Amino acid sequence: MIPRAHLSTPALNEGAERQVLQQMRGRFLSVNEGRLARAMEGLAPRQKALLNLLALLFHVNHPLLPGYVSDCTPAGVSGYQPDALALTEARQLIRGFSCSMGSSCPSQPIHGLFLMGSLGTLAQTDQSDMDVWICLAPNLSNQALTALRKKCRRLEAWAASQGCEAHLFLIDAQLRNDEGGEPRQRLLLDEFYRTAIWLAGRTPMWWWVPVDEEARYAEFARGLLARRVVGGDETIDLGHLAHIAPDEYLSAGLWQLFKGIESPYKSLLKLLLIEVYASEHPRVSCLSLSFKQAVYANQLDLDELDPYLVVYRRLEHYLIERGDLQRLELVRRSLYLKVGHKLSAVAAGVQWQYLLLQRLTREWGWDELHLAMLDSRSQWEVQQVSHECRALARELSVSYRFLSQLAHVEQATAPK
C-alpha cells in the first residue's frame, strides 16, 4: 500500500508525487494489458483483426476505410499512435496505408476507447459480442454527433459482414450515450471502472484519485491538474463513486428485471448486487472501489480481479452473513450457467477459464454428477425447467421488492 502521506494534497507540488501516481497508473495498465491479452486469447482471427483496427478507424477519416461517412466526420483519438498490428490490418484494406493518409482533427475529439462486456472475463465465449464505448470531447456539434452515429452504425454493419457482432456506443462526459442514457449513472460508472478495458486515448482520472479521497474527488482532481501533476490531455473524467442516490437502485433494478427476460442468470447476479449495495446505503463500498484499492496495494492477480469472480465473492459474503444458503446455491448455479463453460465436457473455454471455474466448483463441493446435470440443461425435462424458472422468478421478485421498499423508506424520510 502506498503510504498515505505521499498522496495528500499539500504534497501535490512535489516531484515525487507524480512519480508515485504514475506508478499507480502503471499498475492499472498492467491489469488492463492482462485483461486485453485474455480477451484476445478467446477471439477468432477476424475478431482480433477488428479489435486491432478499431482505434485507427476513429483516428483517421479515409474514404476507403470501413465506416466512412463524409469528409466532415470528426476523427482523431487523443494521444493515439497506431502500432504495427493496427497498420498491418489497415494495409490489408488499403495497400501502402500510412497514418498520414486521410484526415484527423488537431483537437482529437475522440478522448478514449474502452472495451466493455464479457470479453477478457471468465464469461467470455465464442458467442461473446464486442461492446465498445467511444468517449467524446465535450461540446461537439449536433452535425458532428450525427456523423459519428452514422459511422458507428456502418462499422457495426461492416463488423457483421466479417462475422463479428460489435456494438459501438458514443459516450459524453456526463455518461450520456447515443441510446439516450441518463447523466451520472453511478451504478453504470461502477461497472465501467471495474470492468472496462482501455484500448486507446486518455485514461480515467479516477485511476489517479486514491480511495480515501473519493469523497473529495473533484477537489483532489482539480489539485492534480492545477499543479500539473497530471496533464489535462492525459485523462478523461467521468466522475466519482462517493455517493449513489437511493432512487438509482430502483431504476437499475427495473432495468435488470427487463433484461432478465433474455438473460435471467446474468440479470439475477446484477440485481442481487444492487440489493447488496442498497443494503449498505448510504455507506456503500462499491466493487470498483475495492478494485482500485487492490490495484493501489499492488494486488494484481487477474483471477482474483476477474469481474465475474469479484461479483460472486461479494454476493457470497452477503448471503452467508444472512444465513441464506438457498439463495447462495441459486447464485452459484446462475454464475456457472451464465459463464457457459461445460466442465463435464472435454474442453471448457481457454485454459485459465477452465482452471478458475474448476477451482470455484470444487470450493462449492459440486461433484461430476452435479456438473453433468447442469451441462445437460438443454435436455432437461419440462418439470425441471419449470422448477428452475420459478426459482429465478422468485429470486428476481425478492430482490426487486427489497429495492422498492428501500425507495419508499427513503422517500418517506427525505426532507420536505
Image (cartoon, rainbow, N blue to C red):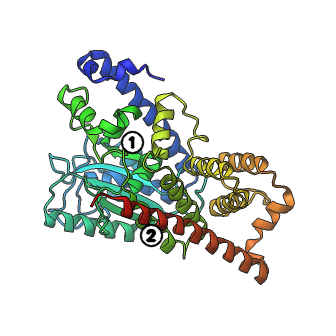
- Upstream in the sequence, badge 1 or badge 2? 1
The crowd level at tag 1 (other Cα within 10 Å; few <14, some 14-19, many 20+) is: few
Residue 25 pos. (x, y %): 39, 32
Residue 267: numbered disc: none
331 lies left or right of 129:
right
Q: Farthest bottom residue?
A: 382
| 112 relative to 17, above or below | below
**Residue 267 visible in the current orientation:** yes
Helix, strand or loop at label 2? It is helix
Give me the residue at 54% from left, 33% from top. 300
> Would you identify the image quadrant in which residue 407 lies?
bottom left
**Based on the displayed image, in which of its 4 quarters is residue 168 positioned?**
bottom left
Q: Nearer the viewer, mark 1 or mark 2?
A: 2
Residue lying at 21% horizontally and 34% vertically, measured from the top left? 222
Name the spot of residue 301 as percent of width and height, x first.
Answer: 58, 35
Instruction: Specify few, some or many for label 2: CA neighbours under 10 Å numbering under 14, 14-19, or 20 or more.
Output: few
152 vs 361, nearest the viewer: 361
The x, y position of residue 38, in whole percent, is 56, 46
Q: Is the Cβ of the residue at disc 1 closer than 8 Å to that at disc 2?
A: no
Query: Which amino acid, by three-letter code, is at mark 2?
Result: Trp
Q: Which numbered marker is on residue 255?
A: 2
Q: Say whether residue 21 is left or right of residue 270.
A: left
- Please identify the quadrant where the C terminus is shown: bottom left
Return the residue nearer the eye: 43 or 403: 403
Please say whether residue 210 is visible from this viewpoint.
no
The quarter holding residue 236 reads top left
Residue at left offset 49%, top offset 46%: 287
| Residue under numbered circle 1 | 84
Q: Nearer the viewer, residue 115 or 320?
A: 320
For the residue labelled by badge 1, is the local secondary structure a helix, a strand or a loop? helix
Q: Tag 1: residue type?
A: Ala
Q: Position of residue 97 (x, y in %)?
A: 29, 51
